[in-house]
Image: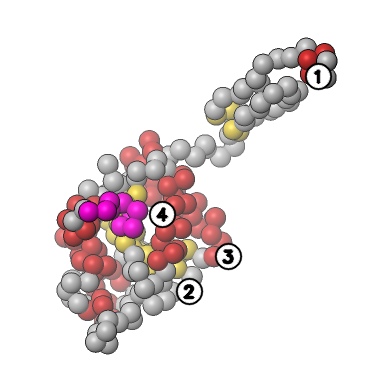
Amino acid sequence: MTTVFVNYRTSDEENVAALLEHALSERFASDVFFRAAKSIKPGDDFEEALLRGVRRSSALLAVIGPRWLEVRDEHDVRKIDKASDWVRREIVEAFDLGIRVVPVLIGEAEPLRKDALPAGLERLATCQYVRLRSRDMEADLDRLATTLIELVPELRDANVVPPAGSTVNNAYGNARVGMQAGTIVGDINFGDFLTRDERDGR
């Protein structure tokens, strides 16, 4: 079941949204995150799929870059001001359903202001945000993953990353292995043991 919906604008940090979802998917089970480009199958009704994805979620990550608010259509109208804008529709749907919305500010993107947002979306400006910066990407992703577990407790069961301080080891072939660790996660496979003559090719 989808737990976290990744909301993003294709004209603003679409690649970062994909990177964010991919990186978090490596920390949790692969089916935890809904991102349109990945999760909607060819031939699906995309409108129905998007709304279903939001409704099945426990949290929505709104990926917001420097151009997010000012992207305009061919008539020079801000997309966010259009009721048909899917970025807006997904966030409003989440608010209406009581789903937690977490703004993810990319780089030096400015926090949103209520007076810059259309009716129904003003609440986004008062949602506590997190920031994702290229210079601190790993640390920021780790903090976001920890935050998501706190906000959505069922993610604890989907967390596939070994806890800090544990050791994952896979050894193959003939090896002399010395190891000291508090926790070992996974299999240790030494392969078939060979005699010295077999090992030397005789």
Q: Percent from the top left, x then y, of residue 137?
A: 53, 59
Q: Secondary structure at mark 1?
A: loop
What is the CA distance from the residue labelled 4 to the residue labelled 1? 48 Å
**Badge 2: residue crowd in 10 Å (few <14, some 14–19, many ≥20):** few
Of tags 3 and 4, the one toward the viewer is 4
Range covered by the magenta-colored residues? 35-43
Of tags 4 and 1, the one toward the viewer is 1
Q: Percent from the top left, x then y, of residue 132?
A: 47, 63
What is the CA distance from the residue labelled 3 to the residue labelled 1? 50 Å
Q: Percent from the top left, x then y, of residue 138?
A: 54, 55
Circle nearer the N terminus (2, 4): 4
In the rendered structure, does residue 185 fall within the stretch colored magenta? no
Q: Which residue is mark 3?
A: 135
Instruction: Confirm or deny contact between disc 4 and disc 1 (CB under 8 A).
Output: no
Of tags 1 and 2, the one toward the viewer is 1
Circle nearer the N terminus (4, 1): 4
Q: Which mark is residue 108?
A: 2
Circle nearer the N terminus (3, 1): 3
Q: Residue at x 48, y 55 (%)?
A: 141
Q: Which mark is residue 201?
A: 1
Circle nearer the N terminus (1, 2): 2
Q: Which mark is residue 21?
A: 4
Question: Seen in the image, is 27 located left or right of residue 172?
Answer: left
Q: How is the image coloured?
A: secondary structure
